[in-house]
Image (spheres, grey):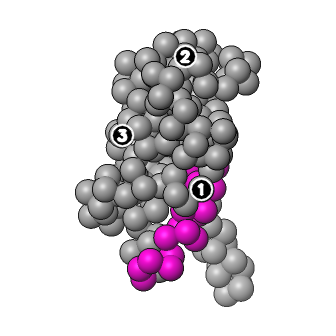
Amino acid sequence: MTEGLIIGSVLLLGGLVVRYMQTHPFYRYKTQKHKERYQSKLHDALDHRSDSTGAYWLSRAIADFIFDFGQRTYHDYHVEQYEKRAQSEIPHLYHLGIEEPNTLCQHLVERAVELKVPASLFGLHMRSLWGGYLVPVGRLTPKSIERIPGSAVYYAELSNLPSSKEDMQRFMEKTGQA
């Protein structure tokens, strides 16, 4: 009788945890796996710079900024403490080589489609990431993005972002695509 009560309690508690995880904004989106993978790679790269806990929360703040287009999809006190530091780290991320620019660009377009991000916000965000040598824009926009369902507006926005020949050349040199 006691074992049955304990097993029933554990199953009930497990079901409540699973239900919470399914409704929490952090786990709501299918493209969350891209964000988590990026955050994990970034954490590994930042781990040697500071303590492991600080590196974890900093990598989480940076991944949130990049994959949530500068908007907050959930609130977390720890992440919010690292947001200012994350802003100062973003221009230096290309040195770490966390993700190929074309791959990151594709993941961000998939995320934008899923989150239904307004094209103007998407364009501004991608422009700032372009300035940090993280994603290609203009004529460097990967053609594979066109094949993503619902991405036509985002592909047009990326393709139409102005970039000079000098900027494109500098981007290719910094990212190793030259």
Judged left or right of residue 37, residue 121 is: left
- Which residue is drawn at the image coordinates 53% and 29% (left, top)? 168
Label located before the other in sequence (1 or 3): 3
Q: Which of the two residues, 23 or 165, is positioned nearer the viewer here? A: 165
Can you identify the residue that label 2 sits on?
A: 159
Dot label at residue 70: 3
Is residue 24 visible to us here?
Answer: no
Can you identify the residue that label 1 sits on?
A: 98
Residue 35: percent from the left, percent from the top? 56, 49
Label located before the other in sequence (3 or 2): 3
Q: In the rendered view, would you say 117 is above or below 105?
A: above
Q: Are marks 3 and 2 in contact (CB under 8 Å)?
A: no
Q: In the rendered view, would you say 2 is above or below 126?
A: below
Magenta span: 32-51
Q: Residues within 10 Å of mark 3 (few under 14, many from 20)?
A: some
Measured Cα–Cα span from mark 1 to mark 2:
23 Å
The nearer-to-camera label among 1 and 3 is 1
The nearer-to-camera label among 3 and 2 is 2
Quarter holding the C terminus? top right
